[in-house]
Amino acid sequence: MDTIIVLDFGSQYNQLIARRVRELGVYSEIVPFYHDLEELRQPHIKGIILSGGPNSVYDEHAPHVTRDLFDLDVPILGICYGMQITQYLFDGVVTPSDKREYGKSELTITTASPLSEGLPDTSTVWMSHGDHVEALSSSFELLGTTPSSLAMAKHKTKDIYTLQFHPEVTHTDYGKQILRNFVFSVCHAVASWSLDDYIDQTTALIRDKVGDDLVILALSGGVDSSVAATLIHKAIGDQLTCVFVDTGLLRKDEGDKVMATYRDHFHIHVIRINAKDQFLSALNGVSDPEEKRKIIGREFIRVFEQFKADHKDAKYLAQGTIYPDVIESVSIKGPSETIKSHHNVGGLPEEVDFELLEPLRELFKDEVRKVGLALGIPKHMIMRHPFPGPGLGIRILGAISERKVAILQEADAIFIEELYAQDYYDEVSQAFVVLLPVKSVGVMGDKRTYEYVAVIRSADTVDFMTATFSRLPFEFLDHVASRIINEVRGINRVVYDITSKPPGTIEWE
Ligand code: XMP
């Protein structure tokens, strides 16, 4: 399949570049900047995009490539840092700067080229850079400028283009057109990436690989494991057995919903293990968040090990690993590293004596969702907000008790129900209730109350690395708070969390 490689220099936008290319119907993969050059010399690799990155080319540990990259005889597009490193290697003048240019700017095309086909003479582009190119390499010609930069350039004889701005972000008006021009007019790639084909090809591959063997999968009810289960089930039917561990720390009625969807609707063989008592007694009296996470992870592994022992004949362990997990575990230093530590928490042991089956390894989250919808998983299951592995265990601050779990489940269910009812659910990225370990005084009827405080949390984010609190209307919050206080025994005060990330995190623990 024709492929465009994104060489990762640490940009927060690198996944976006690959997604944009895939949206054009051409397969794209992200590899670290130090990837073996020889492996990039393959006929299906039609072009290479050098991503941006947070460094200056002059930094001591700045990611560098060698000039050999440009002798691969494949078209190259350098974006932002990718432009600077290209110009630097071709003896252009890159000027270090201690202040960043950040925001919109106006691009003026000064010389037409295949890259600017279909662009007007001037258009809005998005800048986010520190260093800038002061003078182009003598091997390059200028194609476009913004008031403050040499914004677009091309090698005089080779298909090497550089851009100071970011075509992959939506703030760049003709960004998609520029990428389309690069992929089709410069690289001459053929659009052959489609999710329908992906489903057919992947189910065939699974059948081939698994043969008559048995597969087990830990189903969390989250999007990734659910889509993986459904896809594998489509391929091999009853050779798949799923285990759903009910930790007792899930959302209200979660276990029943998962069983109804996957066992009753899809007829997938799902074994539900009710391990609430085991988890709650292991957590008894524990209030440190990291310790809670460790205990929940450990107990999960115990339950799973037991399940595994009961299914010795299974040869494969299936997992809902998706492409961002794969990239994040190889990525160079950069923001993508920061959330990594979460991934194995509440998950499976790293060492398992199974062969792994990871049918979603190549897909981005939005692609996983599309596959899920195409497989018939109900939209409300596919579009659900993420839910952390340790579940309500990290949303009940301090020590956990069965009563607190029940209180939080009720309050959370009301908030989520209202978000759906008033059409806010799909607008916010992650919403939930947190139960605080403090009580406050209130008055209900003519009685004084002394009950717990609950926090409503709702975050808007693209990547979960940065987030702002959702600007939900006061009337809505008022309604949710009244319902929680009136309907949930044990809560008499509700507050709204208006902290962004950073400096806060989305979860409270
Ligand atoms: P924070 O709180 O770090 O959360 O801003 C970012 C995203 O990660 C989720 N999260 C977790 N997911 N195990 C998980 O599987 C965890 O221990 C964990 N902690 C946070 C959080 O829900 C949000 O989507």
Image (cartoon, helix red, strand yellow):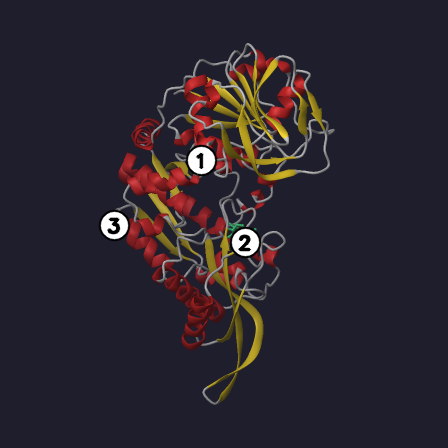
Left of 416 or right of it: where is 497? Answer: right
State whether label 2 is within 8 Å of ligand 1: no
SS for tag 1? Answer: loop
Left of 424 or right of it: where is 14? Answer: right
Residue type (three-letter) at the residue carrying disc 1: Phe
Report, in whole angstroms, how far the alpha carbon at label 3 lies from the one at label 2: 37 Å
Q: Tell me where residue 181 appears, x and y as whole percent.
A: 44, 23
Residue drawn where x is 40% and y is 56% of the image: 425
SS for tag 2? Answer: strand
Q: Is residue 28 visible?
A: no
- The quadrant the C terminus occupies is bottom right
- For disc 1, the marked residue is 354
Left of 322 or right of it: where is 7? Answer: right
Mark 3 crowdedness (10 Å alpha carbons): few <14, some 14-19, many ≥20: few
Mark 2 crowdedness (10 Å alpha carbons): few <14, some 14-19, many ≥20: some
Counting residues from the start of the chain, the first of labels 3 and 2 encountered is: 3
Q: Are marks 1 and 2 in contact (CB under 8 Å)?
A: no
Report, in whole angstroms, how far the alpha carbon at label 1 lies from the one at label 2: 41 Å
Counting residues from the start of the chain, the first of labels 3 and 1 encountered is: 3
Residue type (three-letter) at the residue carrying disc 3: His
Instruction: Look at discs 3 and 2 and give the one toward the viewer.
Output: 2
- For disc 3, the marked residue is 265
Q: Tell me where residue 131 appears, x and y as whole percent.
A: 68, 31
Residue drawn where x is 41% and y is 43% of the image: 224
Q: Tell me where residue 291 appears, x and y as whole percent.
A: 60, 56
- For disc 2, the marked residue is 468
Residue type (three-letter) at the residue carrying disc 2: Thr
Q: Tell me where residue 399 appears, x and y as whole percent.
A: 57, 66
Closer to us: 58 or 321: 58
